[in-house]
Image (spheres, grey):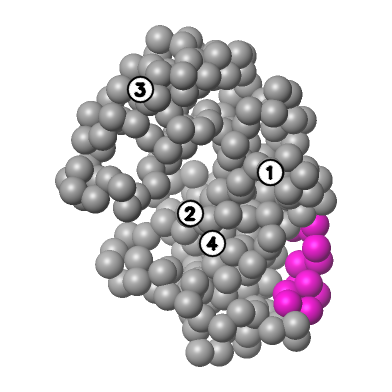
């Protein structure tokens, strides 16, 4: 990525995400990212929340200073917590939100997305494929490594039950994937929401990258297809695949 950025920086938008306990640590992590990316600034920097609830002032003050120094174009937050988002944007400076959203998790549609549109906050969707469930490649007997967060779907009874329900929804979606993969259907759905600016689908090989890119060039979902998706997972419904 750094090699490409060095050669075509003006053609790229670069976003990164950091975790820190103090401003100096946030700056250190950014400097390391800049070195790897072989650039002197990033277009967007986001705070990485995950399961923890840090003092957001660490991020806000640090990001604002980096912005003043020209090392950061805009800053945002990664969270699925609506109250945290509002607090992070208290002064109106939050430019982006990275949050979990997919056919299986439509909860952001109720409060988060309307707020982002009102506040002109760009939404970066993570988990549009629901950690792989919406690719249609997993089944009840799929195995995940011990270090893989998805191993909870095998061990935890509550997570297991939800996983099986999600798999059932995927089977209901299969008839809609005519002329495209299930993954492309899922990406089209996420990209179609007016609050969404872009999605992060992830890819393990070149074929998957090409398939993901092709999803943006396919004909939009029809009203009938969207209506069927609404039947499977009603607007605002589903569950958060990622815990934060």
State the image coordinates of residue 44 (x, y, percent, origin top left): 46, 37
Q: How far apart are marks 2 and 3 (CA)?
A: 21 Å
Label 1 Cα neighbours within 10 Å, binned few <14 / some 14-19 / many ≥20: some
Q: How far apart are marks 4 and 2 (CA)?
A: 9 Å
- Residue corresponding to mark 3: 29
Would you say residue 31 is visible in this rendering? yes
- Residue corresponding to mark 2: 200
- Highlighted range, magenta: 226-238
Label 3 Cα neighbours within 10 Å, binned few <14 / some 14-19 / many ≥20: some
Q: Are marks 1 and 4 in contact (CB under 8 Å)?
A: no
Residue at 60% x, 13% y is 57
Q: How far apart are marks 1 and 4 (CA)?
A: 25 Å
- Residue corresponding to mark 4: 129
- Residue corresponding to mark 1: 120
Q: Which of marks 1 and 4 is nearer the N terminus?
A: 1
- Element on which disc 3 rests: helix
Query: The C terminus appears in which quarter of the rendering?
Result: top right
Residue at 61% x, 46% y is 122
Query: Is the residue 137 above or below the residue 77 in the image?
Result: below
204 or 212: which is nearer to us? 212
State the image coordinates of residue 94 (x, y, percent, origin top left): 62, 31
In the image: residue 162, left or right of residue 148: right
Query: Is the residue 89 above or below the residue 186 in the image?
Result: above
Residue 227 shows which numbered tag?
none
Q: How far apart are marks 1 and 2 (CA)?
A: 20 Å
Label 4 Cα neighbours within 10 Å, binned few <14 / some 14-19 / many ≥20: many
Q: Disc 4 or disc 2, which is closer to the eye?
A: 2
Q: Do the residues labelled 2 and 3 touch (CB within 8 Å)?
A: no
State the image coordinates of residue 84 (x, y, percent, origin top left): 71, 28
């Amino acid at each position: 990525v750094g090699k490409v950025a060095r050669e075509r920086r003006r053609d790229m938008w670069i976003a990164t995400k950091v975790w820190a306990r103090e401003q100096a640590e946030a700056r250190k992590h950014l400097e390391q990212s800049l070195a790897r990316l072989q650039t002197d600034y990033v277009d967007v920097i986001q705070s990485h929340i995950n399961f923890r609830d840090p003092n957001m002032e660490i991020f806000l003050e640090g990001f604002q200073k980096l912005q003043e120094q020209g090392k950061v174009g805009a800053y945002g937050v990664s969270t699925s917590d609506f109250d945290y988002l509002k607090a992070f944007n208290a002064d109106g400076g939050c430019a982006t939100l990275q949050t979990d959203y997919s056919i299986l998790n439509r909860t952001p549609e109720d409060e988060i997305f309307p707020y982002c549109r009102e506040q002109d906050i760009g939404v970066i969707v993570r988990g549009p494929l629901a950690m792989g469930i919406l690719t249609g490649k997993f089944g009840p007997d799929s195995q995940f490594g011990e270090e893989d967060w998805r191993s909870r779907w095998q061990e935890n009874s509550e997570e297991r039950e939800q996983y099986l329900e999600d798999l059932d929804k995927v089977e209901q979606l299969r008839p809609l994937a005519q002329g495209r993969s299930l993954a492309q259907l899922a990406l089209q759905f996420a990209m179609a929401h007016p609050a969404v600016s872009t999605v992060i689908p992830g890819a393990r090989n070149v074929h998957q990258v090409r398939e993901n890119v092709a999803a943006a060039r396919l004909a939009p979902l029809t009203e009938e297809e969207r209506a069927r998706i609404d039947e499977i997972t009603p607007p605002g419904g589903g569950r958060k695949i990622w815990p934060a």
